[in-house]
Amino acid sequence: MCDRRVVSVIVTALVALTGCSAWGAGAGAKTVTRKEAITRSVGVGADDRTLTVMVESGGCDETPRLEASETTGTVSLTVRITTRTEPDVVCPADSRLGPVRAVLDTALGARTVTDGTSGRRLSVHRG
């Protein structure tokens, strides 16, 4: 028969080694969502509705999201990146660059594309 103290020590050691547990999942975790300015040109797909932006993220970041807000004359794009951290967990010091996409309700046409964070007009390339 196992002594409860031994079991407790083993469980504590496993939790410390893995950085998470069924009992403490989310305990002390911190989630922050931030907007990032778009610094690269916007690609427009052949359908004239799919917009693509290359976005940099890293370490404890989830996959970035691209959100589009449309008016008759403008499309405003906003990149949102959610970062999740937990106590005593070190985020890797890596950087990823990858595409994020948004599909417009209507074709882009001659509308202006702006960055929803800075308000800056963005360069657009087709094809």
Image (cartoon, helix red, strand yellow):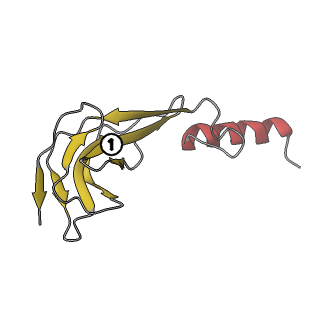
Residue carrying label 1: 79
Amino acid at circle 1: Val
Answer left or right for 61 relative to 74: right
Q: Nearer the viewer, residue 14 or 112?
A: 112
Task: Tell me the residue at 89%/49% (across/down).
Answer: 1
Give the crowd class for mark 1: few <14, some 14-19, many >=20 residues within 10 Å.
many
* Relative image position of residue 16 (x, y in whole percent): 59, 37
* Relative image position of residue 12 (x, y in whole percent): 68, 37
Q: Nearer the viewer, residue 105 or 16?
A: 105
Local secondary structure at mark 1: strand
Q: Is residue 1 above or below residue 16?
A: below
Task: Tell me the residue at 25%/35% (across/down).
Answer: 37
Residue 60 in view of the camera: no
Answer left or right for 10 relative to 90: right
Task: Tell me the residue at 29%/45% (across/down).
Answer: 77
Q: Nearer the viewer, residue 35 or 125?
A: 125
- Which quarter of the image is occupied by the C terminus? bottom left
Residue 34 in view of the camera: yes
Answer left or right for 104 relative to 125: right
